[in-house]
Image (tube, rainbow, N blue to C red):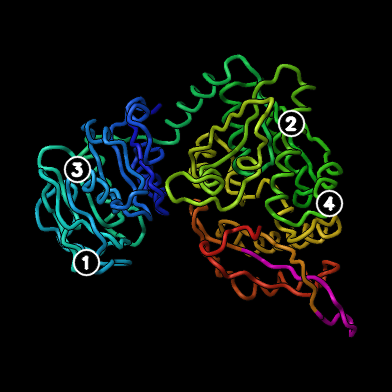
Amino acid sequence: MPRELVLILDFGSQYTQLIARKVRELGVYSEIVPGNAPIDAIRARKPRAIILSGSPASGYRADAPLPDAGVYALGKPLLGICYGFQVTQQLLGGTVAKADRAEYGLATFIVDKPSPLFAGVPKRFRAWMSHGDEVQALAPGWVRVAHTANCAFAAARHDKKPFHLIQFHPEVHHSPCGKQVLSNFLFKVAGLKGGWSMKGFIREAVKEIRAQVGSGHVLCGLSGGVDSTVAATLLHRAIGDRLHCVLVDHGLLRKDEALEIDRELGQRRGLDLRVVDARERFLSQLDGVSDPELKRKRIGYEFIAVFEEQARKLGAVDFLAQGTLYPDVIESASAGFGAQVIKSHHNVGGLPERMHLKLVEPLRSLFKDEVRALGRALGLPDHLVDRHPFPGPGLAVRVLGAIDRSDLDVLREADAIFMDELRRAKWYGRTWQAFAVLLPVRTVGVKGDERSYEKVVALRAVDSVDGMTADWTPLPHALLGRVANRIANEVRGVNRVVFDITSKPPSTIEWE
């Protein structure tokens, strides 16, 4: 465990993950735990500071998520954000009620009294608000620090303990002074030294992997994507030749992907890599399946079956390693009160309840951009580290509707053309993720002066940092025109190409 740990108690805010990211960016390791975690579990982690997140809940309602009251008795530096402010006052004797005037969006934050939390910050600044409740009276021992036009108590501090509360969200991009406020909490209030980095993460991760695995052997599901490549490289550093990588060719990979992965990671980088041809068994499991959740779960079950078979062939293998990331965990199972399951990921929600292999997930607490930084720290080349994300279920969730083998071939060709043109135009590296989707609809077209009735390909390109939110990439019209022209002319069975310009939210990045 890192020397300095900041624990974030999650009450279901959509911004909780951003708090963790911002704290890490400032050089302090942070982790998220459920907001109602028992005090013994919190104390055992030995946090140097605690942050209480926002929430869609109201602290004065009977079903509100509450922190263990022992959190305040610890005396550790504490920052309550939005709901974290309100629930703290609710528990300690203040008054919280529905606001006469809610605040959503930017507001002018006015600092009334000195506070180390606002050192180096203007006395008036713009901040992002998102609350329908408000603190109407502070508990004994608390001092008002700031206000807004609609909120009398926009910030407060305890007169003796290192407790600070703010109503705005410092973690979001729309609060330009937010990063300074978080920095002040970490270094001026909590007295942390910082210095956490990916090199430090590597040292800790290697220790944890060795402690978990002992003298055992690990089977790693390697897809060739950024996540599994970095996970395998980290595991190889920790346990060497006791790592055995398996690439399952399930018939849902991109064009020539299995050959490329074998050449790059097996032959060039020296990983023990076995390529398993499982195309027939996977595609038979998906025959006629159109529901995306069922696709993911069937693929997940079949993956585990293949891995367990390979483990038996290898002999004494006790562990299965996966490149699960934090966004996978968040989308597959709620991290806090009110968080919703968005979709099951094949390596999270799709796992059977009973496995013969124990899981090793060394990247489970990281975001995608952090995984790329980790890959560079491990010495991986840019063309591996900067590769666009690829979903575990592969093309199964990019061929919408029932899986058809000929449709997979069509999509592979269309996607390869898209990637080729992105690279030619030097847009591949400027785009966080791009791919083609085959839609289950046909449209009328004209080819060779004859009527055609063929399928539609949708192009998706997004900009993101961590995969939790994303905006569509404004690719040049000329580039899109070349891609559409090539697909319509070179890919049999397609006569129309469209471009998806929806952000996340409301959409997810993948269509299924």
- Please, what is the three-letter code of the amino acid marked with disc 3? Leu
Residue 375 appears at what percent x and percent y? Answer: 54, 39
Of labels 4 and 3, the one closer to you: 3
Assess whether residue 111 is covered by the magenta stretch: no
Determine which residue is flagged by label 1.
Answer: 108
Q: Are marks 4 and 3 in contact (CB under 8 Å)?
A: no
Give the camera-side residue of 414 and 72.
72
Q: Is residue 237 left or right of residue 17?
A: right
* Residue 307: mark in rendering: 2
Mark 3 — residue? 92
Instruction: Determine which quarter of the picture holds residue 72.
Output: top left
Residue 287 badge: 4
User: Of helix, strand and loop, which one carries label 4?
Assistant: loop
Q: CA distance from mark 1 to mark 3?
A: 28 Å
**Badge 4 amino acid:** Asp
- Helix, strand, or loop for circle 1? strand
Q: CA distance from mark 2 to mark 3?
A: 52 Å
Q: Earlier in the sequence, mark 2 or mark 3?
A: 3
Q: Amino acid at mark 1?
A: Thr
